[in-house]
Amino acid sequence: MAGEHDSKTPQPSLPPPGGHYSHAVRANGFVFVSGQLPITPDGCKLGDAPFEVQARQVLANVAAALRQAGSDVGLLVQVRVYLDDVANWSAFNAIYADWAGAARPARAVVPTGPLHFGLKVEVEAVALAGPEPGAS
């Protein structure tokens, strides 16, 4: 597809995708970031880590996926957050506000119950695309 970024090559700042998907895809001026979990670049699932550690890792993964596709946090337009427990909303909101800075995209926070691998948070996002990666 024209304008689509080849995101099949694993990036050093992200773990390899855990299924048949790309971390981020560019299409029609947007970047779509797949649901990111608190998994470190070397593939360590942070299920036993405190919620705050998981939240920071998942947001680092979102930022890395955005960079991989030529966008960044300041270009976010929508974010969807899935929490295993709504009691974590306040902690997530504080960490997210620090991470997002001046950016205030539309956002939904959905309490879901248990998430994959026993993790506590998952985040997916849509952003405006910046210049094509590698473009001059």
Image (tube, rainbow, N blue to C red):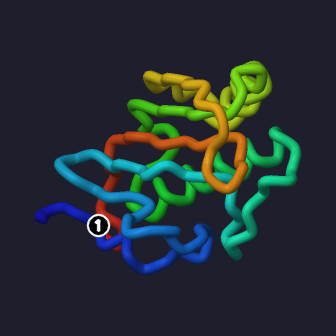
Residue 85 in the image, given as x and y percentages of width and height: 72, 27
Residue 70 in the image, given as x and y percentages of width and height: 39, 59
The residue under the point 22% across, 63% down is 4
Placement of 105 over or under 114, stated as above or below: above
The number of callouts visible is 1
Q: Which of these two is toward me, 70 or 8?
A: 8
Residue 89, by quadrant, is: top right
As helix, strand or loop, the secondary structure at mark 1 comes to loop
Q: Which of these two is toward me, 37 or 101?
A: 37
Determine which residue is flagged by label 1: 5
The residue under the point 39% across, 61% down is 69
Placement of 76 over or under 4, stated as above or below: above
Q: Which of these two is toward me, 37 or 69?
A: 37
Q: Horizontal placement of 50 versus 125: left or right?
A: right
Direction left: furthest residue: 2
Residue 51 in the image, given as x and y percentages of width and height: 81, 40
The residue under the point 62% across, 69% down is 13
Counting other residues with Cα less than 10 Å from the Cα at mark 1, is it few (<14), some (14-19), or many (20 or more)?
A: some
The residue under the point 38% across, 69% down is 20
Question: Which quadrant: the C terminus?
Answer: bottom left
Question: Which quadrant: the N terminus?
Answer: bottom left
